[in-house]
Amino acid sequence: MNIRLATQDDLPRVNELRAQVSALHVAGKPEVFRPGFCEELQDHVHTLFSAADHAILVAEGDGGIVGFACVKLVDRPGSPYRLPQRYLDVDEFGVDEAVRRQGIGRALFDAVRDYARAQGVHRIELNMWEFNREALAFYEAIGFATYRRYMEYRID
C-alpha cells in the first residue's frame, strides 16, 4: 500500500469515497444530513485541495485509491480563557466499505500523524457523530481519546 498526497486526478475517486461517508451520515442522522451527494459537496473537495492550510492524503492499494483523509492545519489565537492552539484537524476520513478492516485506516492514520509531525504539530483532533460506533471503535483503537463532548436534548 502506498499513501501519498492527492493529485488533482485523484479527486473524482476521493469524491466516490466521500459519497460513501456522506451516505453513512445520512442513514445515521437523517434529521441533520441531506440525502444524496450534490454538486456542491462534490465541488468542495476542490476547495480543500486548493487551500493552503489543507491537505488530502490518499491510500492506494492494488485496485487504486481505497482511502482518503482531508486534514487542516489549525492555528487558533489565544483568548482570555484559552491559550493559543496549533493542531491538525482531521476534517474527513474514509476507507472504501469494500476493503475495511484490512489495516488501511490504520496505515492512513499513520501517514496523517507523520504529516502532522512534518508540520511541527503535536496534536491531532477530529470530531465524529456518536451514532458511528464503528468509527469510534477505530479511533479509540488507534489512540484517540475523548476530551470534549457535545450533547443535545431533543424536544419532540
Image: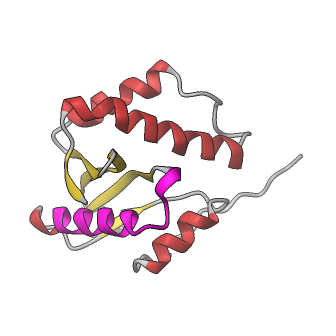
Number of numbered tags placed on the structure image: 0
**Residue 89: x %, y % from top left:** 33, 57
State whether the magenta stretch is mostly helix, strand or loop.
helix
Can residue 29 be seen here? The reply is: no
Residue visible at 46% across and 28% down in the picture: 41
> Along the horizontal axis of the image, is 106 left or right of 132?
left
Foreground residue, 153 or 54? 54
Q: How is the image coloured?
A: secondary structure
In the picture as drawn, the residue positioned furthest to the top comes out as: 39
**Residue 7: x %, y % from top left:** 18, 36
Does the magenta portion include 104?
A: yes
Residue visible at 18% across and 68% down in the picture: 114
Foreground residue, 106 or 81? 106
Task: Using the image, determine if residue 95 lies above or below residue 21.
Answer: below
**Residue 134: x %, y % from top left:** 59, 66
> What span is in magenta?
97-116
Q: Indicate the quadrant where residue 150 lies.
A: bottom right
Can residue 39 be seen here? The reply is: yes
Q: Indicate the quadrant where residue 104 lies.
A: bottom left
In the picture as drawn, the residue positioned furthest to the front comes out as: 62
Does the magenta portion include 25?
A: no
**Residue 34: x %, y % from top left:** 64, 31
Residue visible at 25% across and 60% down in the picture: 1
> Along the horizontal axis of the image, is 135 left or right of 5?
right
In the picture as drawn, the residue positioned furthest to the right comes out as: 156
